Amino acid sequence: MSDPSVTVTVDGRDLEVPAGVSVLDACRVGGADIPTLCFGPTMTPANACRVCVVEVEGSRTLVPSCSRRVEEGMRIGTESDRVLHSRRLVMELLGSASELDRAGGDLPRWMELSGADPSRFGEAEPEKGRQPPSPGHGHESIPGRAATVFEPVKVEDELYVRDYSRCILCYRCVDACGVEHQNTFAIAVAGRGFDAHISTEFDVALPDSACVYCGNCVAVCPTGALVGKIEYDMREEGVWDETRQEVTRTVCSYCGVGCNLDLHVQEGRIVKVTSPHDHEVTQGNLCIKGRFGWSYVGSGQ
Amino acid sequence: MDIRLLLDRPTAAEREAVDRVLGSATSDWDGGGPSRADGHVARGGRATRRRRHLLLPALHAVQDESGSISRGALGYICERLSIPPAEAYGVATFYALFDTGKPRAPVMVHVCDDLVCMRRGGAELRIRIEETLGPEREGAGERSWGSSPCLGQCDRAPAALVHTAGTGYETLAPYDGVTSQVTIGQDRGELTLLRRAGVVDPASLDSYRAAGGYSMLDRAIGIGPEGVIASLEISGLRGRGGAAFPIGAKWRGVAEAMGPDKFVIANADESEPGTFKDRVLMEGDPFALIEALTIAGFATGATKGFIYVRGEYPVAETLLAGAVAQAYEAGLLGRDVAGAGFTFELELRRGAGAYICGEETALFASIEGHRGEPRQKPPFPTECGLFGRPTAVNNVETLVAVLAVLEMGAETFASIGTERSKGPKLFCVSGDVTRPGVYEVPFGTTLRHMLDLAGVGGSGRVGAVLVGGAAGAFVGPESLDMELTFEGAGAVGAGLGSGALIVFDDETDFGPVLARIARFFRDESCGQCVPCRIGTVRQEEALVRIATGRTIGGLEEERTRLGDLARVMTDASICGLGQTASTAIQSAMRLGLAGAP
């Protein structure tokens, strides 16, 4: 039995798409350029960032295209003034609260395309005045300054760094650690509202938590809030340079599962290991050995 | 699920408190002592995890017992329910009434600093409390205090909620010192919904029955589920919680859904600033809510119901708990309700300090034992609600109005009010009025008439009325002849919302008022979606700048910025909180209430 299809209209063009696909997929089939942030191709949409919203005729509010399924006859607009406004404001709001200069993917391009100006909400709070989020709410901001999500960088081990001043609370790391991928549940969203943040239980250090150091949270983080220690150190030193990196695909040699590894090599040295998101075995996930167990490669012995 | 537990152990008192909710642990598998059989069987698994919905009751038990939730206590709850500690911590830190920080003083006073209380002696009260107990949340020794959003006691402001470790909560209006009061502003002869409130003994089923109680359940059983739903459709009754959805359509949706697992829920998480009508109904006439919810179960085929009552309403909760117990004893709940052959179980759940949990999908998440984060609709609750099952959620006043429909007949009910707004309606009048309280009037009554009933106080001249609470809109003195109907409110750019009418006299400085409304949304945003999580913060910052005369780029630029924020929050937020977080502020801007030269 072939999949039934439905007809939808995207920006005035009729399209036939398989029933059950997301509005985002339908729009992209139709050639529309829609940004996404919290949406991960291997994960259930978290619906959190709202940067992918589009107009659906008959709907009072804009609709997140990543999670909404197409329906027969749906009329979708991706370029209306309303859509562009929300897109720009979401970028501006995120840029005003979090440091986005290490965000990967499409974010820099979209910041520019949408004309976002995060500085219009005022000067950011000085780091010194900002306390790490405390449980509960009622946090006081500094008058005349724009509150940020600043937190001191957490360096608790040799494998990865948590720099939550870059966090946009997309829920991807929590979902990857939990039901979507790893089922370890070492981290969750704690607190509420603007004080919501990613945390272990009672904010214990990662080595004291349930973390198994698979690094699958690092793999899905879109903004560089979670990053390998080597990459973090190189970035801090100003020597991280992706244009000088070569990526070599291989198969992990530790066990028989057959995970694909992408070795990121800069100046003859492995600086990061990932797995392709579209690889059917891993969907981008690895274990501690595949992701971090390669220091022997560069050993002189 | 393979979870890593906390190594901290609970105290004996904490363990007992948790066990009172969850029952005793049966083996080493769920936190009990080791037994000989443990090595030969595996317990836990799905059966344990299905009890996840008991997380909030267990956290409440510990908080009530100790005044805070220690690592040991949280760890024990996690062990009992097979919940990863990071997740349980995420849940506990979501709710304002749970304390996971350092141990606090045994007595905690939550002092309301919201719109109404601050106009009615709240500011002076705070100063006195600070003098006695020291700085907010720092008071050492026996007592400490903190500020709180609206406690729903606006008819006798200023109000405070006191929590004592080992005892629990009590509400207090410091001026009169009594814990419960049913303030009805008008002549009792005109009342339908409030007819029994303040007249019957709320702790006695016999008293309720003597006043005609439970005769509507008999009538519902007589006309059958279809008869009940058809009556509601004819009556034109629409929801009183804010969304104004036709109740007949909602109940029909659930009644027609397949499968035996369905739910009906009374949304008693009344947290809209300036709103206290549901509290008055529950404190004055708790059995009416239970009877109405039983009828909801009968009509929709749901065999299980919940009342989700806000944590700040301890008197209502206690009375409801007693009423549920008496109804069970009398055979009016449980199996074979009233001998009519249907089953209806009813459970009471207590919120924990989160306005957002009045949003129906957040309410589901909260009952299920999660952070109160709303989810995207569709799917709608009638299709996919509590535990993913078809669910009808109704506001307390709406449910009580169901009794009125059955009693007076659908046609009579529909003849009250206007074309699109039918029946009697409760309004909570507070602020600068001489007789604050709940008023019951037919739909279509004008705002001016309501103000005549309650008497304008302060300077005696109206500056503006906030219709519908913080999520509502300001209307100016030129609009006092507006009809208080869904359509009439819409015509002046407002909504009836929860039925709150907060009156501000013409000497009000609206700068701080608007900043307080903005702070309310900043504090109460769940934090899930960007437009609301960050937009409510930027909105508050802008209003503080305006109120203190230090704008960025002048007032006009601030207005543009606020307009941009309003638009993205309204258009792109997940739920009604973000979508209405700018309504009152934008209406004030249009009326020129803020930043006037």
Image: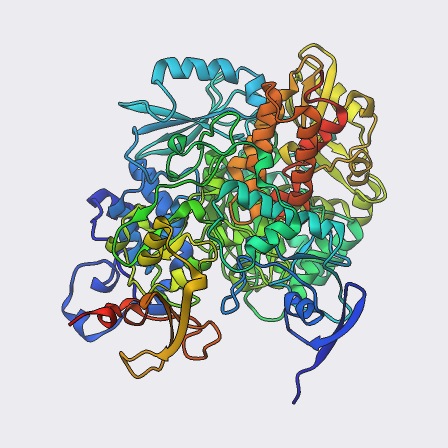
Report whether B547 appears left or right of B456: left
In the picture shown, does residue B289 fall above or below A46?
above
In front: B439, or B115?
A: B115
Residue B548, by quadrant, is top right
The residue sitting at the top extreme is: B459
In the picture shown, does residue B97 fall above or below B455?
below
Image coords of residue A276 (percent x, y):
44, 73
In front: A134, or A297?
A: A297
Image coords of residue A117 (percent x, y):
61, 41
Residue B410 visible? The answer is: yes
In the picture shown, does residue B55 fall above or below A259?
above
Residue B269 visible? The answer is: no
Q: Residue at x 38, y 52 (%)?
A: B55
In front: A57, or A87?
A: A87
Colouring style? rainbow
Image coords of residue A103 (percent x, y):
49, 54
Report whether A248 appears left or right of B553: left
**How many numbered marks have been drawn onto this rendered protein structure?**
0
Tell me the quarter of the image containing the C terminus of chain B. top right
Q: Residue at x 28, y 53 (%)?
A: A206
Tell me the quarter of the image containing the N terminus of chain B. bottom left
Report whether B80 appears left or right of A195: left
In front: B79, or B593?
A: B593
Image coords of residue A111 (percent x, y):
60, 50
